[in-house]
Amino acid sequence: MSIVILRGPEAHYAQAARVPDAVRARLAECAADAGKTIALRSCRSEAELVDGLCGLRASGVELLLFDPGACAPASERLRRALNALDTPYIEVHDDDMDAPEPSLAPRDGACLAQVHGYAAQSYTLALAIALEHLGCAECGHGVHVGT
């Protein structure tokens, strides 16, 4: 598996955050065009999110798109799990609220970038950065991040 999207719970719901099917299909298409696979895991709690981060070590993931959801600001346990990551990651925030979500990680270590956008726009931009980091920018598949 090349790229994993790991999402935290939504702020106002006791359920996992949901990525619309059309967005998931578009992200999968972009990744496939670059010769990569993409998987999505939506978590219902911070504990599940931390477990997902810890499970990356054994799964052969090349890059992580990490959306903390309602787990921002981060607890000490989540911050430790992020700091222990060997897998490079991009912190993604789909800021569709009035105020931007707080960033969790300093811009050092495994964190390559922090992306703030509106809904699907943030995932599209983060995937473009991920593919460029993985050496797939030359795949010729243009990514449009506008609405």
Image (cartoon, helix red, strand yellow):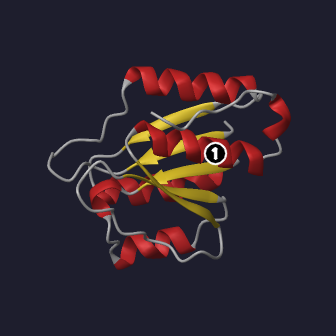
The amino acid type found where label 1 is placed reads Ser
10 Å neighbourhood of mark 1: few (<14), some, or many (≥20)? few
Residue 129 appearing in the image: yes
- Which residue occupies 66% across, 59% down? 88
- Which residue occupies 51% across, 21% down? 25
- Which residue occupies 38% across, 57% down? 68
Which quadrant of the figure contains the C terminus? top left
Q: Quadrant of residue 47?
A: bottom left
Residue 61 appearing in the image: no
Kindly identify which residue carries mark 1. Answer: 59
Q: How many marks?
A: 1
Please provide percent x and percent y for residue 85. 60, 66
Q: Residue placed farthest to the front in the image? A: 146
* 111 shown above or below 66: below
Which quadrant of the figure contains the N terminus? top right
* 20 shown above or below 59: above
Q: Tell whether 50 sits left or right of 143.
A: left
Please provide percent x and percent y for residue 73. 32, 71
Q: Quadrant of residue 93?
A: bottom left
Please provide percent x and percent y for residue 11. 20, 53
Q: Which element is circle 1 on?
A: loop
Q: Tell whether 121 sits left or right of 1.
A: left
Task: Pick the residue in front: 122 or 68.
Answer: 122
Task: Pick the residue in front: 12 or 128.
Answer: 128
- Which residue occupies 65% across, 27% down? 30
Q: Tell whether 49 sits left or right of 63.
A: left
* 127 shown above or below 55: above
